[in-house]
Image: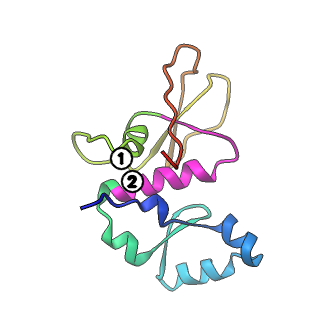
Amino acid sequence: MQPSNPEDRLLFVRDRALLIGDDSALRRKAARGELRRVHHGVYATEQDWSRWNSEERYRARVFGIGQSRRSDVVLQGYSAAALWRLPIIGAWPAEVHLLTEKAAGGRSHARIRRHAVGFEHAGITTKTAST
């Protein structure tokens, strides 16, 4: 069986707004329970969300947060492992882990954990949505 690709099933408000100029339809569907809010401006159908396992849900959250940022992000730890489909020991975390520059500012919050350690000596491997 092919692995599920939840990142291919996400609905982004910015894409929908470009098509019809408004995101109110998505918000109404979310209020009715037809859509699940994955992150600000990112939704999945409730049917997809209920079908996905915890790894697929976490990968959807990681991808949704990564794609909704205004600039490129560097994923760290569990979040990078999820996109690379690497196994972990234990449960997937609630937070998406991002690596940032030491002086970049920004703050962690309920769903995003920023690790301000810088990049100067980091071995960074890139992965795009198409690879």
Q: Residue furthest right?
A: 21
Can you say whether 47 is above or below 104 in the image?
below
* Magenta segment includes 124: no
- Crowding at dot 1, Cα within 10 Å, few <14 / some 14-19 / many 20+, comes out as few
Left or right side of 88 for 119: right
| First to last magenta residue range | 56-75
Residue type (three-letter) at the residue carrying disc 2? Tyr
| Residue 25 x/y as whole percent | 64, 82
- Residue at image x 32%, y 53%? 55
131 or 44: nearer the viewer: 131
| Residue 99 x/y as whole percent | 54, 31
Asked whether the beta carbons under mark 2 and mark 1 sit within 8 Å of each other, the answer is: yes
Residue 58 is labelled as 2
Pointer 1 residue: 93
Give the image's coloring scheme: rainbow
- Residue at image x 22%, y 39%? 89
Left or right side of 91 for 17: right
Which is more N-terminal, label 1 or label 2? 2
95 or 56: nearer the viewer: 56
- Residue at image x 53%, y 68%? 43
Callout 1 secondary element:
loop
